Image (spheres, helix red, strand yellow):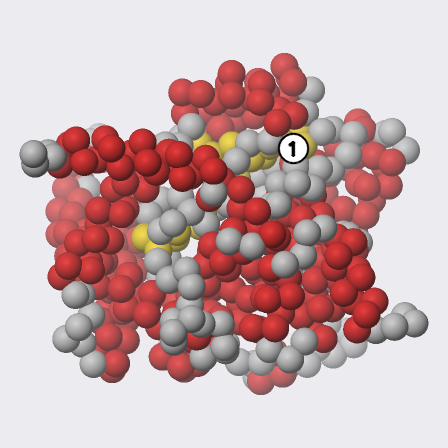
Amino acid sequence: MLISLRGLKRWLGRLIGVLLFFTLVAGSTLQPLKPNQRVHMYTRGIEFNYVSWTIDALFEKAEQIGVGATDYLAEGEATSFVRAYMDQLGKVMQIESQLALLASDENLADPQVDAAELIHARDALRERLDRMQPVVEAILQEQVAVSIAETGIEMGGVPFPPVNFHFTRPPMALILSPRDVIRQDADISLNPSITLEEVQALEARVEQEMNVSALVVPIGGVGIYPTMVSESTSLAWITEVIAHEWVHNYLTLHPLGLRYYSSPELRTMNETTASILGGEFGRLTLAKYYPDLVPPPAAETGQEPQNEESPPAFDFRAEMRETRLKVDALLAQGRIHDAEDYMEARRQYLWENGYHIRRLNQAYFAFYGAYADEPGGAAGDDPVGDAVRNLWHALDSPSEFLTAMAWLTDFQDLRETLAEMYPGE
C-alpha cells in the first residue's frame, strides 16, 4: 500500500521527535534545563518547532541529493557560483534596509506605494536566490568537509557525521540566570518572528514573576541535523558557523557532547571547543577555496602605529572582562542591586563607544561567557576557557584536539589531562 506524502511526513515527524528527544537534545542548544521548567508557562505559544523544521529541511536535502546539485560544476565554477549567490544576497539585504527606512518614514503618505518597485525587485532576487540556495549549500558542505577531512578527521575520506546544513532564520533563545550568581539555568528556543515589543514584555514578565535574570538573544546557528545557519554575505562567518555546528554534531556522538547540559563547565568546554575548531576549519576553507577573503594577520593590516598622544583604541573584550569581574565580585558579596545598576551603567558606556548592547545582565554573561575561545571578554576569569585553550595550543593538530576533548566527561578530566602534559605546573 502506497503512503501519501502527508502520511510520510506525519510518520517522519514522530520518528524525528523521538530522535531529537533521545539524542540531539543532549548536545545542542534546544534543551531547557530542569530547574526552570516553569518558564514554559510564558513561552509555550511562541516556542520554536524543531520537529516541523527538521522534516522540511530533510525533504529539501533529499531533493538536493536526488538532483546532484554539484555534479556538473568544476571547482572554479563552484566557487564562482557561491560568490554570485553572496552578491545577490547582498543586493537583497540592501533593498530590505531601504524598505525598512521607507516603512519608518512618517513623511510618506503611503510607504507601500513608494516601496512597490523595491518590493518587486526584492521578490525577483529572492526567487533567484531560492533556486540557487540548494546548490550553494551543497558546495559549501563539500568545501568545509574537505577542509575538515584534510586535518585527519575523517572516515573513508569524509568527516563523520557528514557536514550537512541549511540556510534559515534560526530561533531566538531565551536565556535564564539566577540573579545572585551568573549561571545559565535555561535556554528556550523561540520563534524568530517574535517582535522586539514581545521580547521586552516576555523578559519583564519572566523576571518579575520568577525573580531571575532573563535575556532573549539572536543565535547564528543550531547544531541539530541538518544544522541551522543564518544567512550572511560574509563567507568567513558562514564557513566558521557551518564548521562550529558540525563540531557540535560530532561531539553529540561522544561523552562531551552528550553531557552538554550537565554543568556550566561542560557547556563552556563544548562551546569553546566548537568555537576554536569552527574558526580553524573556517579559515582553512577560505584559504583553500576563497584565499582573497582570508583576513590578514593584525601586523599586516597596514595600520599606522598609534603615537603617544593618540587616545588608546577602545578594547571591547578588555572592557567586558573588567565588567564581568566587577559583577562577579558584587554578587559574591550579595550586592545584587548594585551589580545590576553597575551593568546598566556599563551598558550605556559601551553603547556610547559603538557597541549597541540592548541589555547587559546576568543572563547575558551566562550565555556569552561560555564562548571562551579567546581570553577575556564575557567569560571574565573563568578557568575553563583557559584550560581548553591551553590544550588546543599543546596538541599538534585539530584532529588530536577534537579527539581529546570529545572523550572528556567533566572539567576535572580536562585538568588531569593538562597535568599529565605539564607535570609540576
| Badge 1: residue crowd in 10 Å (few <14, some 14–19, many ≥20) | many
Left or right: residue 312 versus residue 197 is: right
Left or right: residue 88 versus residue 290 is: left
> Residue 36, how many percent across, how many down?
62, 24
Q: Is residue 122 visible?
A: no
Q: Quadrant of residue 319?
A: bottom right
Q: Residue at x 49, y 28 (%)?
A: 199
Is 286 placed above or below 418 here? below
Left or right: residue 23 versus residue 182 is: left
Left or right: residue 416 versus residue 125 is: right
Q: Residue at x 28, y 75 (%)?
A: 79
Q: Residue at x 86, y 41 (%)?
A: 329
Which residue in the structure is indicated by mark 1?
Answer: 185
Secondary structure state at the residue bearing disc 1: loop
Taking depth in this image into account, of 114 and 27 the one nearest to the observer is 27
Amino acid at pointer 1: Asp
Is 192 placed above or below 233 here? above
> Residue 155, how many percent across, how many down?
42, 71
Q: Residue furthest front?
A: 1
